[in-house]
Image (tube, grey):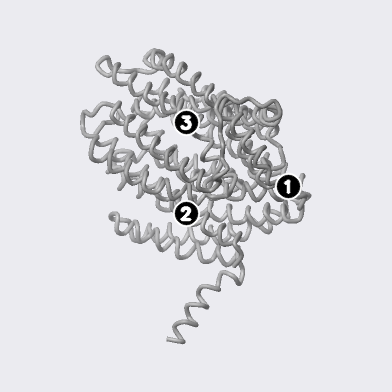
Amino acid sequence: MSRTRHRSIVNVGTTATVAVLRACEGLIIVAYLLRVLGTETFGIWALISTMAAYLLILDLGVVGALGRLLAGCRGANDIEGFNRTLSTALTLLTGAGAVTLLVAFAMAEIFPLVFHVPDHQLADVRGALLIAGVWAALYFPTSIFDVVLWSHERFDLSNLVEMPVIAIRLCLILLLIHEGSPLTHLAGIGLATNVATVVLTAACAWWVEPRLRPVPGVLSRAALREIYPIGFWFSALSVARSLTQQVGTTLVGHSLGNRAVATFTIARQLTTYCATVMLSLTQIAAPRAAVYFFGRRGDEQKILFVGGGRAATALALFFVGGFLSLGAQFISIWQGGRQDAAFVPLVVLLLGEAFPMAQGVTYSILTAMGRHQTLARFAMMEGLCTLCVAAAVVRPFGILGVCYAVAISATVFRGLCPWLLTCRLLDVTPLAYLRYAVFPVAAVWAAATAAISLTAAEWPVRGWVSLIGYGALYAAIYLPACAFIILGREALGPAKDLIRRLRIT
């Protein structure tokens, strides 16, 4: 097995593991916090998390542009250009961190004016917002180390750092957060574990590239000319997507109250977990897409687009089918019957995210081709459409109206538009893509989802054991069939090896 293939397998394996661990951590924490904090306080915490996410848009696209530029320097073995670009980005991101801290102070004062906060929680909420602002300010300059690992395709190291941190953060929350605990304690745990992640990631970055020399205060004109043409549109893309991601929670909290935020957050969070797993797996293709583009390897770009799209579609439909057939039972058991109303919003959001989740490789290809401007325009149109439609329907139609606004905008502007653009750029007909990448997988998905839904209707889920059993049955039906469609005869290789070894034994 080649070194590149081995590295890709390790990257996929560790990334999938981290994505699953994050999802499990989130499921446990959400259920626990809802129980110990109560619906009202949990809704406030969800809004604080939303405000913290808004702060992360202030990097002006430098982080996104840096990854692409460092990958190019590495491909050209230009360590001088690598360090020059990295140092310039560090200086810019340090300034962004300082601005972020000032914005966080202002946000802490404005928050109680926009959302309902009980008088006895005002100081606690402001403190939690300031802690979140401190982390956002630290995130910008320290994110360069994660980008260094990204540019070297060392996702495995990033993931190995993340795994123990996830476990430690979960244990700290379960041990230290109880009924009546202040939100500042919760924010402090997040800050401490994030700082630990940064320190370990920096050590890994220097181990991978000992010649790394980031110098704060350096501003290279050549590096600025490279960063800002890309960074401007990366910034627009980042801002638009972040606003789109958070606008639903903000509108629900402002118009419907903190309890409605909790219900919407359940549906939104489960959808986000699925999208995060997909993003974690498909971003592995980003450095390879950059290599193919800069190397003018058009045929390999087409193979990556169609073959990667087929694998991404299979994974996206796996999540959608699982929640369609077992989502209602899962939410009921997970939340003890307190948030059953979140199932229908979850279905709407997941159906809207299905095609966008399947286009993760498409996004990597367009980014490598320098189509940030077009992606940013799509993202801005998605955000504008979501905001306008959701604001118009939130009061008459409630949470479900907001979900439809989010879902339709995502399907059109984050799914169909980038996909059609890439088909045109790579000279792949949409029908050929659908016939090769979507239809075979969709047929397996429909059969597996129908089988599990009918079985669960005949023999209802009674608890965690039967739910896990149904989930395992769904995976056993769906995943091997999709693996055979995606890999062909190569999918039978491990089984043949096992049979051969058993015969020898």
Identified by mark 2, the residue type is Thr
Secondary structure at badge 3 equals helix
Whether tag 3 and tag 1 are in contact, CB under 8 A, the answer is no
234, 152: nearer the viewer: 152
Q: Which of marks 3 and 1 is nearer the N terminus?
A: 3
Position of residue 104 in the picture relative to residue 358 (left or right): left
Q: Looking at the rendering, in which quadrant would you find the N terminus?
A: bottom right
- Residue at point 49% right, 23% down? 97
Q: Which of marks 2 and 1 is nearer the N terminus?
A: 2
| Numbered label attached to residue 433 | none
Which residue is the extreme one toward the left? 179
Q: Nearer the viewer, mark 2 or mark 3?
A: 3
Q: Distance between the residues labelled 2 and 3?
A: 23 Å
Secondary structure at badge 2 equals helix
Which residue is the extreme one toward the bottom? 504
Q: Where does label 1 land, which residue?
A: 293
Q: Where does label 2 land, which residue?
A: 14
- Residue at point 40% right, 52% down? 326
Identified by mark 1, the residue type is Phe
Residue 194 at x, y percent in the picture: 40, 36
Residue 369 at x, y percent in the picture: 72, 42
Q: Where does label 3 land, which residue?
A: 139
Secondary structure at badge 1 equals helix
Position of residue 356 in the picture relative to residue 131 (left or right): right
The answer to whether residue 313 is above or below residue 499 is: above
